[in-house]
Structure formats: C-alpha cells, structure tokens
C-alpha cells in the first residue's frame, strides 16, 4: 500500500464518499454527544498538489453525508445528517456550481443517522430517505416535488427506546422495489440493560412505498447489517455487528454471519478472534479481487459497563480492524 495524500481534520472522520475529482469527508467534531458546531465536510482532491478545503463548517456532530444531483443542474448537492444531541437536523445543500452551498433544512430534529437518495416513487426525481434516532425514531421519505421543494412523509415509526442504529435499501424479494433492512441496538444507557427487541429487521415494500415488517432476527446491541450473497448460492445472507452485545453472557455476538439456508432461515456463525475489538463499523467488497465478497470490520475501544477488563484487553492486544477473507473462491 502507498499513501497518495493526507489531510488534517477535526475529531471523528466518519464518512468518505468518492467522486471523479476527489473525496467528500465528513468529520463529526466530537465523538461524545454534543451540540457544539465543530463538525465539517471537507473535500480532498485526487490531485496531490491540491490541498484539502472545507465545503461546509459549523455542523453539529454530523455522522453521514450523501451526494447527489437533486435538482438536475449537473452539480453535486449534499445531504448532511447532524445527529448532535438536542438540536441536530437533516439538511440538503444546494450547489450553485460556483462554490456556494445553500442550506435547506428538511427536518429540524436531532438524531439524523443516515440518508440515501433514490427515486422512491418513480417520478424521475431523486428523493431522500433518512433514518432518525434520538427520541422521535423512524424512517422518513422526502419526496422531490421539483423546484427545490421536498415533501416529508414518515415511512416507519419506532418507539423512542428502540435505539435505531442503521438502515439500508435493498431488494428483499426480487420484485424490483427497494425494501429496507434496519438495525436497532444503540444501548448507551446508564447502566445499559439487555433489550429483547434489539435486532435486525426487514421491511418489505408493497410497491407503493408502504412497508411491512417481514423478518426479525434478535441481536442484542445490533449496529449494522449487510445483506449480500456471500456464499454465492443465489440467496442473500446477512453479515451483522453489535456494538453493545451482552458482553457477560454472549460476547460472540459482536459479529454474526447469518447464512441463509433457504426461505430466510439462518445458520449463525462467527469467527474465533471476534473478541479482538469492539466492532463499530463494517463494509464489504472484493478486496482480493478473487470474485467473492470479503468483510472488513472496524473497532472503537470504548468502556464496557459493567467493567469486565475488556478495554484493557483491547488496548493491549486488540487491533483497529479485521479483514475477513471469503474463501468461497
């Protein structure tokens, strides 16, 4: 591996999106819950001689940014998720093509976790779909009505205790409509207690953006789930991580591979070294270019309540990431 560039950012570089010219990098400004306006969106050029520049500053603990041309003017616009603590928001930023970004607040509430752009109602305009936690939990659609106007509609509502942590759009049933995979498992309570409703859920789209829960897999502290055909047998498996597993009774659930045995019945597996980190993020890709999907896990060493000595163990013997190589090919 060879480093081709570097840039200084504030605390918490959490999301990177590639474009033809470079990378849009989201920096939280603070890992801890905060309303301080320390978050930023940077642009890192692929040209080594060009320094990084700030696209948006004074964000309140942003955790995700989506890029898309939302109004058809051939310029990338941005959708920022400011999770914050009490005063966050979801905003789309109109790019005028001259280096100016104008904010348009879609939802003036904290807890924005992730946003995607997709033509959900098939009217040839890109809509925005976003997940919120932090009290008023749910998944919201922002339908593009043209002329830079968006209409909000709640797709799914969850109880305020759910601890929403992740969602993605995928075709669950092969009908061409995008369904939803969702995890809830945020459990940074004082002290945290096990919650039987934590886990992985799939919501099926009936074709009119009405969603019904069709699968629930319990997983304490679930933080992310990726549905892919890892074993290449024609159906979708699920790779999942938990940032808040039951460390006393079931620590092995920090990473779970759910092999689809048919009809969405799963065989759960993990790997022996899963205790070498506390897995906060996960991604997949054919990293060794052998024709199958590998899995990459990233760890964040954070205290465990009650104290089981795990933080000391992770500091002494843990590693920041693990690559799980798929041996299918």
Image (cartoon, rainbow, N blue to C red):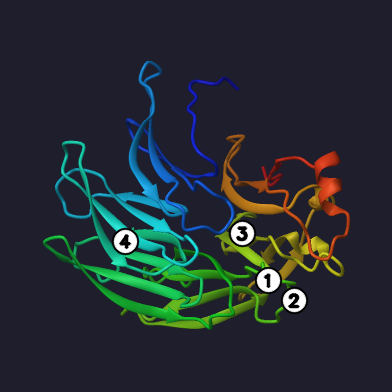
The residue beneath circle 1 is 189
Q: Which residue is painted at 36% across and 20% down in the image?
A: 47
Report if the CB atoms under discs 2 and 3 are less than 8 Å apart: no
3D distance between C-alphas at marks 2 and 3: 38 Å
- Secondary structure of the residue carrying tag 2 is loop
**Rendering coords of residue 87 (x, y %):** 42, 65
Q: Which mark is residue 118?
A: 4
Task: Judge left or right: residue 289 versus residue 45.
Answer: right
3D distance between C-alphas at marks 3 and 4: 28 Å
3D distance between C-alphas at marks 1 and 3: 40 Å
Report if the CB atoms under discs 2 and 1 are less than 8 Å apart: yes
3D distance between C-alphas at marks 2 and 1: 8 Å
Foreground pick, 11 / 177: 11
Q: Which mark is residue 193?
A: 2
**Rendering coords of residue 28 (x, y %):** 49, 48
Which comes sooner in the sequence, label 2 or label 3?
A: 2
Report if the CB atoms under discs 4 and 2 are less than 8 Å apart: no
Residue found at the far top of this picture? 49
Residue found at the far left of this picture? 147
How dense is the environment of label 3, judged by Cα within 10 Å: few (below 14), some, or many (20 and up)?
few
Which comes sooner in the sequence, label 1 or label 3?
A: 1
- Secondary structure of the residue carrying tag 1 is loop
Labels 3, 4: front one: 4
Task: Judge left or right: residue 193 versus residue 2.
Answer: right
3D distance between C-alphas at marks 1 and 4: 34 Å
Q: Which mark is residue 233?
A: 3
3D distance between C-alphas at marks 4 and 2: 37 Å
Task: Judge left or right: residue 124 versus residue 177.
Answer: left
Q: Which residue is painted at 32% across and 30% down in the image?
A: 21
């Amino acid at each position: 591996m060879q480093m081709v560039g570097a840039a200084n950012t504030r605390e918490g570089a959490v999301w990177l999106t590639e474009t033809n010219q470079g990378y849009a990098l989201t920096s939280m400004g603070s890992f801890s819950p905060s309303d301080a306006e320390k978050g930023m969106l940077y642009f890192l050029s692929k040209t080594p001689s060009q320094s990084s520049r700030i696209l948006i500053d004074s964000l309140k603990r942003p955790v995700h940014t989506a890029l898309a041309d939302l109004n058809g003017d051939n310029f990338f616009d941005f959708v920022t998720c400011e999770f914050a603590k009490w005063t966050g928001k979801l905003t789309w930023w109109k790019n005028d093509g001259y280096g100016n970004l104008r904010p348009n607040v879609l939802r003036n509430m904290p807890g924005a976790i992730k946003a995607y752009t997709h033509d959900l109602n098939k009217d040839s305009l890109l809509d925005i779909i976003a997940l919120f936690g932090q009290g008023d939990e749910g998944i919201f659609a922002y339908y593009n009505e043209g002329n830079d106007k968006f209409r909000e509609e709640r797709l799914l509502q969850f109880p305020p205790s759910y601890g929403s942590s992740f969602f993605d759009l995928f075709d669950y049933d092969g009908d061409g409509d995008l369904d939803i995979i969702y995890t809830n498992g945020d459990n940074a309570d004082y002290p945290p207690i096990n919650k039987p409703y934590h886990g992985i859920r799939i919501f099926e789209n009936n074709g009119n953006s009405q969603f019904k829960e069709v699968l629930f897999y319990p997983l304490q502290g679930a933080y992310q789930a990726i549905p892919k055909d890892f074993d290449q047998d024609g159906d979708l498996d699920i790779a999942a991580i938990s940032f808040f597993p039951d460390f006393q009774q079931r620590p092995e659930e920090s990473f779970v591979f759910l092999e689809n045995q048919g009809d969405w019945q799963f065989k759960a597996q993990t790997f022996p070294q899963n205790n070498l980190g506390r897995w906060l993020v996960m991604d997949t890709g054919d990293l060794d270019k052998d024709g199958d999907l590998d899995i990459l896990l990233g760890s964040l060493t954070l205290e465990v309540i009650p104290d089981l000595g795990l933080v000391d163990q992770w500091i002494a013997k843990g590693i920041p990431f693990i690559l799980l190589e798929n041996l299918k090919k």
